[in-house]
Image: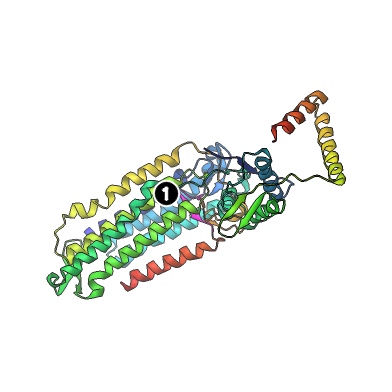
Amino acid sequence: MTVRLVAALGQLVTTLVMLALPHVSRPDLLFGVPVPEGFRSTGAGRSAIRSYRLMIGIPAALSLLAALFLPNPAFAGAAVPALMVLGFAAFVAQNRKLKPFAIQPPQVRQTTLGPPEPLPGFTCLGILPLLLLAGAAMYLHSHWDQIPARYPVHFSYDGTPNRWVNRTVRGVYGPLLLGEELAVFLFGMALAGWYGSRRSESMRKPMLVVMIAVEWMIALLFGAIPLWFAGGIAIPIPALVLGPLVLLIPAMAYAIRESNKPRDSLDPTPNECWKGGIIYYNPNDAALFVQRRDGIGFTVNMANRWSWAIYGSLLLVVASMLVL
Amino acid sequence: MPGPVLRIDPDSSVPLVRQIVDQLRIPLVEGSLKPGAVLPPVRRLATDLAVHFNTVAEAYRQLASEGWLDLRQGRGATVVERASPAPSRRELSGYRQRLRELVSQMRAQGVSPARIAAELKAIAEGIE
């Protein structure tokens, strides 16, 4: 029953996040389409939001009932990704529906010829998680003989171990290596976001803060687990679960607060360069990151050749997850 | 302290390269960008203006060919001391024609000759 409840909770959270999507984007955007002020309360605006809610709400409700009453764990595992794909499809469908109402954002661009903007001082905090993971690896190396020959690394909901690893280089250092890889990727993305976006973009600093906070979360999580399981350092469960969120929650709150502040006009990205309001492809724009139209933060300009480096790195991280 | 502002309009009939060149020339002529000043790298300026790298690179090349910038690999675009050239009779005639067009446009919009003269005087004297 616990498994079913957890699966249902996962589905519920996913559904609520997707239903909230039209309300977290800027008021001058609806399903990634730039719209005039007050468009949301017009017939067309309300109809699009209603259709979107129905497209997600009905399958989500059925899926929730199935998760609670069907004794099939495979279904529960597939429901969340399926809901996300459905949400994506519903968003794109409404984007297409609203395209005739789109207004072109102001295309006049302005910048100053002043000295280059320095990276904020707090960016150096992004180096510490890398050192933290390296420190954990050094600790395990120096206590190698004390690591049990075989130890649990995964537990079921009732606390019974259900996956074990042997004391091998891969078993002990694998999670740390994966954590290091993720941390390097996130720090790289934080720097790329700063240098690859427009200086006029007000979300530049909040995004840097969030990326560094996520990097800390990963480092604390991937550093603590091997120390606990292999190193035998008893870490209280609440600290293990809540510790990594200590930095992330304020960082997210800061980003949301900044995104809700009155902002300048929409990023001068031409409507025709947006596919479904989600993918941006503009070979005539040198920016690597632009203001996203489907939520808060940035998205990649897929016409920029550096975007392939990002997707390549991401692929490498995913491959490492499968291997390590 | 923020430097001179650069503003471009892709919907204008004036090509983007020309808009960038014309606007960069103003602080260069007025002296707010002095010799030794380094302009933003091509990638930075192109990103901020949401244009292709080549657009900014071409604008910098044109200004370099006019003698305003030094474009050395790895040093960026540096403003250099430029000797005042003597315009030819043909060039002067071209400027006069452009001024006549502009003045006619202003007169057509109802700007008085005295106001036009005052504006031209203020602009000409404002430039070093």
Q: Residues within 10 Å of mark 1 (few under 14, many from 20)?
A: many
Q: Quadrant of residue A177?
A: bottom left
| Position above or below: B41 against B89 | below
Q: Is residue B3 left or right of residue A88?
A: right
> Can residue B52 be seen from the camera position used here?
no
Indicate whether residue A294 is drawn in magenta.
yes
How is the structure coloured here?
Answer: rainbow
Q: Where does the magenta region start and end?
A: A291-301
Q: Position of residue A229 (x, y in %)?
A: 18, 65
Residue at x-position 40% and y-position 43%: A256
Give the tally of numbered discs: 1
In the rendered view of the protein, which quadrant contains the N terminus of chain A?
bottom left
Q: Amino acid at mark 1?
A: Met
Q: Is residue B30 magenta?
A: no
Residue A13 image position (x, y, % from top left): 34, 52
Quarter of the picture containing the C terminus of chain A is bottom left
- The chain letter for the residue carrying disc 1 is A
Residue A304 lies, in percent from the top left, at 55, 60
Instruction: Using the image as rendered, state which of residue B117 and residue A180 is in the foreground.
Output: B117
Q: Is residue A287 above or below residue B30?
A: below
Q: Within the image, what quadrant is residue B2 found in?
A: top right
**Disc 1 marks which residue?**
A207
Is A166 situated above or below B103?
A: below
Q: Quadrant of residue A166?
A: bottom left
